[in-house]
Amino acid sequence: MMTSKNLNNFNLENLPIVIGISGASGTVYGLRTLEFLLQNNYRVDLVISESASKVAINELNLALSTEPVLLKEQVLSYCRISKSENLTVWSYDDIAASISSGSYKTQGMIVVPASMGTIGAIASGTSDNLLTRAADVCLKERRKLILVPREMPFSSIHLENLLKLSREGAIVAPACPGFYHSPKNLSDTVDFVVGKVLDLIGIDHELFKRWEKAKRDTLTLL
Ligand SMILES: Cc1cc2nc3c(=O)[nH]c(=O)nc-3n(C[C@H](O)[C@H](O)[C@H](O)COP(=O)(O)O)c2cc1C
């Protein structure tokens, strides 16, 4: 069996995935990604920005603590998971956290959703909070960094930052749901974006129906 390896040449299986949730609209994308990974027994290191907590209140009526033990209980409860040893939650300002160091091995990081503020900070390498530092670690260690920006429209500054990050090896996967899988409700739309992100990190899922032209043509003919 082929085992997946990254440029550091170590096996990726069983290593944690870092999830960063920043203050763009769409906290639900981040929490749904977390829920899927935990339900499927992946290990996750989670960091949530202060602005993301403000968005979570507005969009999900979810008040999040800054204290990691409480925050872990809150996100698990949101994901309807009773407890999980696979989840480690870090404080946003805990710059000494494991994910702050390249010596802590991970499969990579997903920033979902990614605000333009966070994109700008990662693009300029400021690393002045745990989320942007963890992303910077992925870039320097040549690990997967998947960025899910949400903004509309983009300014030239946003686009230049995204281009810079893409050229540096990050994958820019904007929260742009498709409609060719015939979503029936909002969860189908969220699952489309989350499913595309899982594809990019190499995780199998059935969160949306994949496009199969031949099948569609047969249905039209019937
Ligand atoms: C309800 C709400 C929605 C927001 N939506 C977006 C958004 O979609 N994209 C974005 O770039 N910023 C958005 N912002 C602004 C960011 O939260 C703000 O720029 C913040 O400083 C980002 O901080 P962070 O990158 O550390 O999370 C939103 C803010 C609020 C309160």
Image (tube, rainbow, N blue to C red):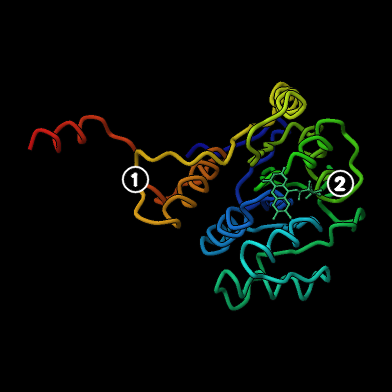
The amino acid marked with disc number 2 is Ser
100 with respect to 202 (left or right): right
Instruction: Give the quadrant of residue 149.
Output: top right
Residue 13 lies, in percent from the top left, at 60, 48
Residue under label 2: 101
Residue 46 lies, in percent from the top left, at 72, 58
Residue 181: give its label.
Answer: none
Residue under label 1: 209
Cα gap from disc 1 to disc 2, whole angstroms: 38 Å
Q: Quadrant of the C terminus?
A: top left
The amino acid marked with disc number 1 is Lys
Q: Is residue 181 above or below residue 166?
A: below
Q: Is residue 57 above or below residue 99?
A: below
Instruction: Give the quadrant of residue 124.
Output: top right
56 with respect to 208 (left or right): right
Assess disc 1: are there few (<14), some (14-19) or many (≥20) residues with their C-alpha within 10 Å of its C-alpha.
few
Residue 62 lies, in percent from the top left, at 66, 70
